[in-house]
Image (cartoon, helix red, strand yellow):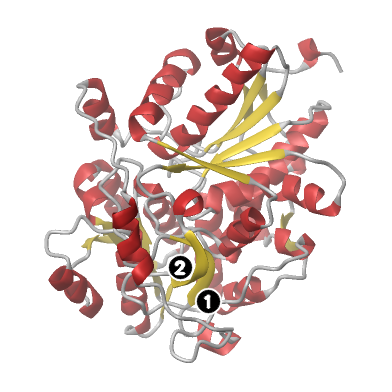
Amino acid sequence: MSEKAIPYKIYLEEHEMPTQWYNVRADMKNKPAPLLNPGTLKPMTAGELGAVFCDELVKQELDDTTAHFDIPQEIRDFYKMYRPSPLVRAYCLEKELGTPAKIYYKFEGNNTSGSHKLNSAIAQAYYAKQQGLKGVTTETGAGQWGTALSMACAYLGLDCKVYMVKCSYEQKPFRREVMRTYGANVTPSPSETTNVGRKILAEHPGTTGSLGCAISEAVEDATTHEGYRYVLGSVLSQVLLHQSVIGLETKAALDKYGIKPDIIIGCAGGGSNLGGLISPFMGEKLRGENDYRIIAVEPASCPSLTRGKYAYDFCDTGMVCPLAKMYTLGSGFIPSANHAGGLRYHGMSSVLSQLYDDGLMEATSVEQTAVFDAATKFARVEGILPAPESSHAIKVAIDEALKCKATGEEKTIVFGLTGTGYFDMVAYGKYNDGEMQDYIPTDEDLAVGFAGLPKVDL
């Protein structure tokens, strides 16, 4: 089909929306290492995980052989409020860059929560409701996940408790108020309301917090209150499974017009959007059907893939959660208060860590002033104010497009625009006023986190 026949925005029909999630683990030759019990250092059983997570989600978490899971009809009906989401050709950005590259972005910000997080939030809330629970607890960094979960819980009539990383709680009061409007109880983390929060505050006075801290508090809250379970917005395999709707729709839209991407780019914090975006493409790569260049982009201030160690580590700062084998900076690592709050986790999804270690994808880190340079350029020509997290992918997409300009290659680039930045105006204000700084940990800073890695001999 000719290029002229390709619309500016590719919308799939409702009946083309996925009816199943895709589990990339099923096609992985080297499976992700199992989660370990922090007490025994043996693989977690379904019963042990069931004390923290919903039963059905435990089954999804432990299943690395089933390729496809049916999406329940109630979840599909909810998805119809904002899915399928559009795949957009960035014609204006291409023109601004003067590149022969074709740039597409999958836009996940066209729902009330403002990000891709709603795809998994509604699924996890649904399974909690099906189990007859009173409510759920969680952590949130920049606030997108907390917003999405509070929206999903309001829809299903569940109680929602959110521990929000303290620096984001202070930087993004409007995001906090959206959560409260949906009925969530929002607490800045670390807090004085949990034992682990008080311990972290005693050890790190004045800390701005981290996702690892907030996770510890949310898990403690869930496990000490009857009728509650903990839900997580990233990192876990179940989350990547739910987020596969992003990649499945992206591939269906591209296939509809005979487009094959050369490069697929996503921002990387814990791995939810990147894992979801790349899943069907990675599946083809694993099966030997197609090849793609896949790039994970992380902040230079929290570089788990590019400077971390591949080892078993606690998923939380309080060391109460299971251990996961992942690229990590150490559960005690607390990153600087950068503005991409959703990319401040000390580790990376075990699935993505294994794929990266196997050489099936690349990783790069970028500094936040360069990220906001790219965000501003994108906003001025494409008309969408991107989230700081998404802008990491924009930065590298622009870099790759400029390489094409230099070489004359007409590559097709696809990146994930995970959400909007309308609640990130403090960050944009600091950038516009020339007050933004880059925070890059030294080797000595990282050594402190690495020193706390648990000794696991399997």
**Residue situated in front as seen by the camera: 155 or 331:** 331
> Residue at left 34%, top 47%?
341
Residue shown at the point (37%, 35%) measured from the top left: 367
**Label 1 neighbourhood size at 10 Å, few (<14), some (14-19), many (20+)?**
many
Residue closest to the far front? 444
How many numbered circles does the render carry? 2
Q: Where is residue 4 shown, x and y percent of the image?
A: 77, 10
The N terminus appears in which quarter of the rendering?
A: top right
Say whether disc 1 or disc 2 marks the residue closer to the N-terminus: 1
Front-most of 420 and 345? 345
Q: Which residue is mark 2?
A: 231
How far from the left and from the top, in percent, is residue 415?
59, 33
| Residue of label 1 | 54
Q: Is residue 367 visible?
A: yes
Disc 1 versus disc 2: distance between alpha carbons?
A: 8 Å
Which SS class for mark 1? loop
Q: Which mark is residue 81?
A: none
Residue 243's x, y, as percent?
60, 52
Residue at 30% from the left image edge and 40% from the top image edge: 339
> Which residue appears farthest toward the bottom when viewing the image?
40
Q: Do residues under tags 1 and 2 come within 8 Å of each other at their CB atoms?
A: yes
Amino acid carrying label 2: it is Val
Q: Quadrant of residue 42?
A: bottom right
Going by the numbered disc 1, the residue's amino acid type is: Cys
- Asked if residue 193 shows in the view, the reply is no
Report the residue at 46% width, 35% height from top: 392
- Mark 2 packing: few (<14 Cα in 10 Å), some, or many (20+)? many
* Vertical order, 286 against 171 (above or below): below
- Quarter of the image that includes the C terminus: bottom right
Q: Is residue 125 above or below residue 178?
A: below
